[in-house]
Image: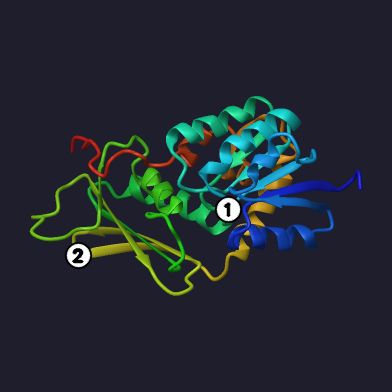
Amino acid sequence: MDSLTTVIIVGRGRMGSCVRRLVEEAPDMHFVASYDENDAFKLDTAAPAVKLVIDFSAAPALPHIEAYVRRTHAAVVSGTTGLSDEELTRLSALGAVAPVVHAANYSLGVAVLRRLTQEAASALPGFDVEIVETHHNKKVDAPSGTAKLLVQAVDPNGQDEVVYGREGLVGARPARQIGMHSLRGGTVAGTHEVHFFGTDEELVLTHRASSRTIFASGALMAARALLKKPAGFYSFEQLVFKDEENSDPWMHSRSLTTSPQRPKRRS
């Protein structure tokens, strides 16, 4: 048992259940317990100490995860989306006492999509950019955390205007604007498209997830890499791409919590 990584999972929804299944199947891990935002208070004092916490819950569980990590120094893999900048700051502060990684998406393909999006945006100045994300009809937040990550890849300095859908007489599309569109329906695990529109040409970068298993598998991949790291706050990219080791994890993890009307960058 000492050689196994003991695991607590926070979140009993679809992702939490998928992660639990993979943890129970993993030969190097041992599932100990699961909690969600309704009973996460048990993490404060009653939950047993483990080596790893995997969190796919919601913001209300964060204070209890903070208390648990400060008590046990357990490593944290966080995949909870919809966190505010203040909540992400608190999560990153746990890196002072334990290794912590946060990502809106633990798919290796999405990590590559972010890099390609960043390269395309740099190579195609002046192109109009529109981002479309599609998810199942049970998803409660919009746009997705991954879509926000892609906005950061296009505009890392946050100087463009992000428009969330369009309606009515909106006029001609201005420069330095990013369109964001969220579709919800059926059982779609997750599709993300980044459209670059130029004169007489269009480039589309697309990632389609066929099941949630890819996100759970990626979370376990991140966990295994994280457990080899010292205390600190890491991005998923830092754990899977060697050339990202010295990059700023905040740029990969922070959420867009400002209003849809962001300051424009000068053309």
Mark 2, secondary structure of its residue: loop
Residue at the limit of the structure toward the bottom, as seen here: 186
Q: Is residue 196 visible?
A: yes
* Depth order, front residue of 197/224: 224
Judge the density around disc 2: few (<14), some (14-19), many (≥20) Cα neighbours within 10 Å: few
Q: Is residue 207 visible?
A: no
Q: Mark 2 or 1, which is nearer the eye?
A: 1
Mark 1, secondary structure of its residue: loop
Query: Residue 41: percent from the left, percent from the top?
Result: 65, 40
The image's colouring method is rainbow
Residue 106: assigned label: 1
Judge the density around disc 1: few (<14), some (14-19), many (≥20) Cα neighbours within 10 Å: many
Query: Residue 2: percent from the left, percent from the top?
Result: 91, 43
Query: Residue 189: percent from the left, percent from the top?
Result: 51, 67
Seen at 27% across and 36% down, the residue is: 159
Which amino acid, by three-letter code, is at mark 1? Answer: Tyr
Residue that badge 2 annotates? 200
Q: In the displayed structure, would residue 224 be above or below residue 186?
A: above
